[in-house]
Image (cartoon, rainbow, N blue to C red):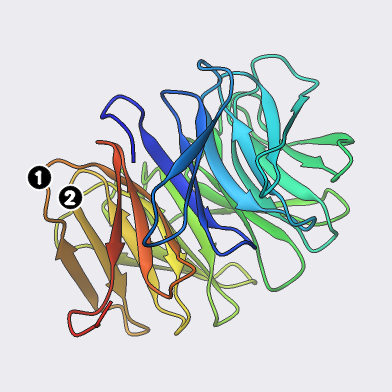
Amino acid sequence: MADSAAGPYALATGPDGALWFTLVHSGRIGRLVPGEEPTSHRLDPACGPSVITPGPDGALWFAEYRADRIGRITTHGVIDEFDLPTPGCGPFGIASGPDGALWFTETAADRIGRITVDGRITEFPLPVTGAFASAITAGDDGGMWFTLNQANAIGRIGMDGEVTLHHLPTQAAAPVGIAAGRDNALWFVEIAAGQIGRITPDGQITEFPLPDRTARPHAVTVDSDGTPWFTEWAGNRVGTVSPDGSITVHDLPTPQCEPHGITLGPDGALWTALEIGALARIAPADSAT
């Protein structure tokens, strides 16, 4: 996709049947239709685009971590950017909410933000300091769920701005990625503890240790069958977890490729962003494509 310094980081499937991905180190947004050549769109080279997500308006929305902005790109490549009110807030995770707006995390400001499709921004303070709010996703219960990497907790914010925190059983687990399951629960990864976690809407938490506790799981997504898939940033693997907690991992062919984001692609396969400058496609071994 790019040279090794560009840093593919996160990716999402757009409404145009393409994969859209961030190049965090080179300040670009990339686009790939499986089977075709990739293209990219230039941003401020130093803006640090992190997570990208489909918006409710048919565009892709992304966080500019170093520039304190939220960006929007149409499927035709038209870009708009919105400065956030709080300097140095470090937006990272972003996801569409059930209210037709985008919700995002502010890692350095202990806040959750909300932006409407016309650019109106609201910020909601968290009840903790130094929490490093990271990934965020919409739950089936009408709220937005997010990880607090340094507060060792999973949070939920309602559409009214009310925040609830659920502390993890494992100390210093440092949760990062989070995704809504098809079982009304949320799945998340604990990068420092080497575990996959599951939390129900009422706050019941189950943790599943990985075979390699030093693998540093980073991101998680759920496939069309409801199976959670995750990346192991230090383990050079992707893996799945079954409903009973059984873990299966798959080695990536290239050593030290540093898998970050993972998503279900437009072709039904799983795709992951490799910081070495590539996207990897994961499909069943007997798949014909």
Q: Pointer 2 and pointer 1: residues touching (CB < 8 Å)?
A: yes
Name the one closer to the observer, 164 or 272. Answer: 272
Residue extending furthest toward the front: 36
- The answer for how far apart the CA atoms under marks 2 and 1 are is 7 Å
143 left or right, relative to 220: right
Q: Earlier in the sequence, mark 2 or mark 1?
A: 2
Q: Residue at x 90, y 36 (%)?
A: 120
Toward the viewer: 6 or 236?
A: 6
Q: Residue at x 79, y 42 (%)?
A: 114
- The image position of residue 52, as x and y in percent, is 57, 45
Residue pointed to by mark 1: 255
Percent x, y for residue 59? Answer: 71, 50
Q: In this orientation, does residue 165 appear? A: no
Q: Position of residue 239 (x, y in %)?
A: 26, 66
Residue 236 marker: 2
26 relative to 62 in the view: left or right: left
At mark 2, the secondary structure is loop
Q: Which mark is residue 86?
A: none
**Residue 160 visible in the snapshot:** yes
Kindly state the secondary structure of the residue where label 1 is placed: loop
Instruction: Tell me the crowding category of disc 1: few under 14, some 14 to 19, or many 20 or more residues within 10 angstroms, Cα based.
Output: few
Q: Dot 2, crowdedness within 10 Å: few (<14), some or many (≥20)?
A: many
Residue 36 locus on image (x, y percent): 39, 56
> Tag 1: residue type?
Pro
Count of numbered marks: 2
Taking 65 as reference, is 181 above or below it?
Answer: below
- Residue sitting at x 75%, y 19%: 86
Quadrant in the rendering for residue 58: bottom right
